Image (tube, rainbow, N blue to C red):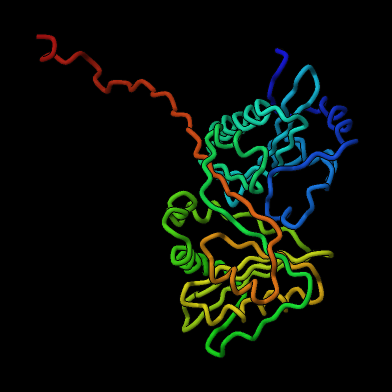
Amino acid sequence: MGMNTTRSVRPTDLVALVSLDGRVYLNEARTWERLGQRPEGPRLLDSGIGPWLPFASRRRTWVYVQRQTIQGLVSARQRANRTTWEIDRLIATTNAELAVTDLFEQVSAAAAQAGVSRIFLRLETGSDCSAAARRSGFAPYLQETLLRADGAVESTPLPVDVLAESRQAADAFSLYRLYNATAPEGVRRVEAPTFQQWSAAAEHRGCGRVQCDYVVRRSGEAIARVRVSRERALVRADISAHPAAADAMPGLIDLVSGFAHATRPIYCLVPSYAGTVESTLRSAGFALDSQYVVYMKRTALPIAAAKAARSRLAVPNPIAAV
């Protein structure tokens, strides 16, 4: 083994990982369930040893080792299906860009071997890992703003001709149509050019004791989607709204605040192209918390070696032999 190496985490790394837990290292990867968490916590092993090991969870984890000391760690997990991953842990104990770049390359190689075609990553704007992500082939394609409300939120009920219902499996294609009507072509081309890729790229929304997923319709057509998850100390939400649904926006905020009850703060993640959503949230009492950049990398899937085909001719072709 050389002086520096990047490899999958091993059971023998437990001692080294525990020793790192004596200090706080920022997890640069900002998945949905980490939105609203402050950079100073949690610590590296916030959820115990098990989730870091491949035999104990579905997470794939790698470490960057320098002189037998762990200098960085990255982990990836599946999104909606096995063709799409997202990086959910990215921790560097050193400022060396080489460590982060090697970790990204290891994730990419493993993803290709596993048949994964795309890897997503969300970083806070200005993250120290941004340059390494770009050099490793992660292309930024979307900016997002996280808004926060700590007090009362101004809202009004939905218009009488608008109905909000819990999302059903049969709503998938209508929600994909809503996505196509709201996201610009440049984002769709990278994130979800087809229904299958849109389904596969769905980000985890499983965090929170209480959750809801509303489809909002007018005259039977989906004009908005509202997702909310409530924990003890915070609420996370996101709102997708058709450009023609501006009059329903205060009612969509009412859905969020009603589901939140008295829990505060409320965080709402807004993509840069959803200007009406952002302006309405700000008017209702939300303010800027943080900003993010979303990256995506397409992996080069390995091509299976061609197999020699057996000839069906039992004897040489007499014409070819002339």
Is 262 on the left or on the right of 28, as rendered?
Answer: right
| Residue at 57% across, 35% down | 111
The vertical placement of 174 against 47, above or below, is below
Rendering coords of residue 164 (x, y %): 59, 79
Is 211 on the left or on the right of 14, as rendered?
Answer: left
Is 229 on the left or on the right of 13, as rendered?
Answer: left
Can residue 93 be seen from the camera position used here? yes
The vertical placement of 198 against 133, above or below, is below
| Residue at 60% across, 74% down | 280
**Quadrant of residue 128 in the image?**
top right
Q: From the viewer's side, name the closer residue of 266 and 47.
A: 266
Rendering coords of residue 56 (x, y %): 77, 39
Q: From the viewer's side, name the closer residue of 67 and 134.
A: 134
**Quadrant of residue 61 in the image?**
top right
The vertical placement of 78 against 157, above or below, is above
**Residue furthest out toward the bottom:** 160
Can residue 210 be seen from the camera position used here? no
**Quadrant of residue 278 in the image?**
bottom right
Image quarter hosting the N terminus: top right
Q: From the viewer's side, name the closer residue of 167 and 185.
A: 185
Rendering coords of residue 258 (x, y %): 72, 79
Rendering coords of residue 263 (x, y %): 81, 71
- The mark total stands at 0
Image quarter hosting the C terminus: top left
| Residue at 57% across, 60% down | 271
| Residue at 47% across, 54% down | 187
Q: From the viewer's side, name the closer residue of 120 and 163.
A: 120
